[in-house]
Image (cartoon, rainbow, N blue to C red):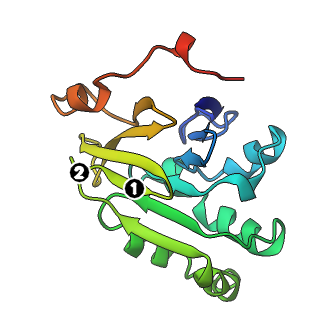
């Protein structure tokens, strides 16, 4: 698994790209989180948006999911995506995306994305198969339905938890995770 940190900034850090991580394996690739500035980083670092099979969302703060309408808009108008994309995350994800996509100028284009787009709301503490990527969400506090994600790709495991403090559920999420020297990254 290759891990690229494309964005690590929150809403208060105006000069940084918001949360966005690109994971790539032999058979699949995904994003973890997709802040509002994500398309800037995707273009800047030369990531092919069509290589992304899934977008995994930790929680519904704008700096973690606010770029999804732009990612889907790009898929329809610029990248001309023809392969399926799954957006997976915590409960209420579908409602929040529906609200975000009600912007009048985006609505017709986003409706056209329905044939290649699936939205999955994940249950905590259960391993889910999201487009060939094993994802096990664990709850953590952040003020909205939040997840720490345990992502298994090519027999490597990554644990990521945005906007959290220590909670016992982080222990099983991080079990068996390897150190950064054992993963590829740019």
Q: Residue furthest left?
A: 168
Instruction: In the displayed orientation, state which residue is furthest to the top.
Output: 181
Tag shown at residue 129: 1
The C terminus lies in quadrant: top right
Q: What crowding class fits label 2: few (fewer than 14 Cα within 10 Å), some (14-19), or many (20 or more)?
A: few
Q: Which residue shows up at 66% across the image and 23% down it?
A: 185
Left or right of 33 in this view: 140:
left
Q: Which residue is mark 2?
A: 126
Q: Nearer the viewer, residue 129 or 8?
A: 129
Q: Is residue 182 above or below residue 168?
A: above
The quadrant of the image that shows the N terminus is top right
The location of residue 27, given as percent across then percent down, is 61, 47
Q: Residue at x 52, y 36 (%)?
A: 154
State the residue at coordinates (29%, 49%): 127
At label 1, counting other C-alpha atoms closer than 10 Å, the crowd grade (few under 14, some 14-19, many 20 or more) is few
Residue 60 visible, this angle = no
Q: Secondary structure at mark 2?
A: loop
Residue 28 appears in the figure: yes
Q: Position of residue 133 (x, y in %)?
A: 47, 49
Label 1: state its secondary structure. strand
- Find out whether the residues at labels 2 and 1 contact each other: C-beta distance under 8 Å: no
Image quadrant of residue 90? Answer: bottom left
Q: Quadrant of residue 24?
A: top right
- The foreground one among 54 and 106 is 54
Question: In the rendering, which numbered label is found on residue 59?
Answer: none
* 82 left or right of 61 in image: right
Foreground of the two, 175 or 167: 175
CA–CA distance between discs 2 and 1?
A: 10 Å
Q: Residue 56 placed where, x, y %?
A: 47, 52
Q: Quadrant of residue 91?
A: bottom left
The residue positioned 68% from the left and 49% from the top of the image is 37
Q: Is residue 148 above or below residue 52?
A: above
């Amino acid at each position: 698994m290759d891990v690229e940190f494309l964005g690590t900034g929150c809403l208060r850090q105006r000069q940084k790209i918001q949360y966005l991580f690109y994971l790539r394996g032999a058979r699949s690739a995904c994003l973890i989180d997709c802040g509002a500035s994500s398309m800037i980083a995707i273009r800047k670092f030369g990531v092919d948006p069509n290589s992304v099979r899934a977008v995994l969302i930790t929680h519904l703060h704008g700096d973690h999911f606010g770029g999804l309408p732009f990612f889907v808009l790009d898929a329809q108008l610029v990248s001309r995506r023809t392969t399926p994309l799954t957006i997976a995350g915590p409960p209420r994800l579908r409602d929040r995306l529906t609200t975000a996509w009600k912007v009048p100028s985006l609505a017709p284009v986003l409706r056209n994305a329905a044939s290649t787009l699936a939205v999955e709301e994940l249950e905590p503490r259960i391993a889910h198969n999201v487009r060939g990527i094993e994802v096990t969400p664990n709850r953590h506090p952040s003020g909205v339905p939040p997840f720490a994600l345990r992502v298994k790709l090519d027999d490597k495991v990554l644990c990521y938890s945005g906007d959290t403090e220590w909670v016992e559920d982080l222990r099983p999420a991080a079990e068996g995770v390897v150190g950064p020297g054992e993963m590829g990254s740019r």
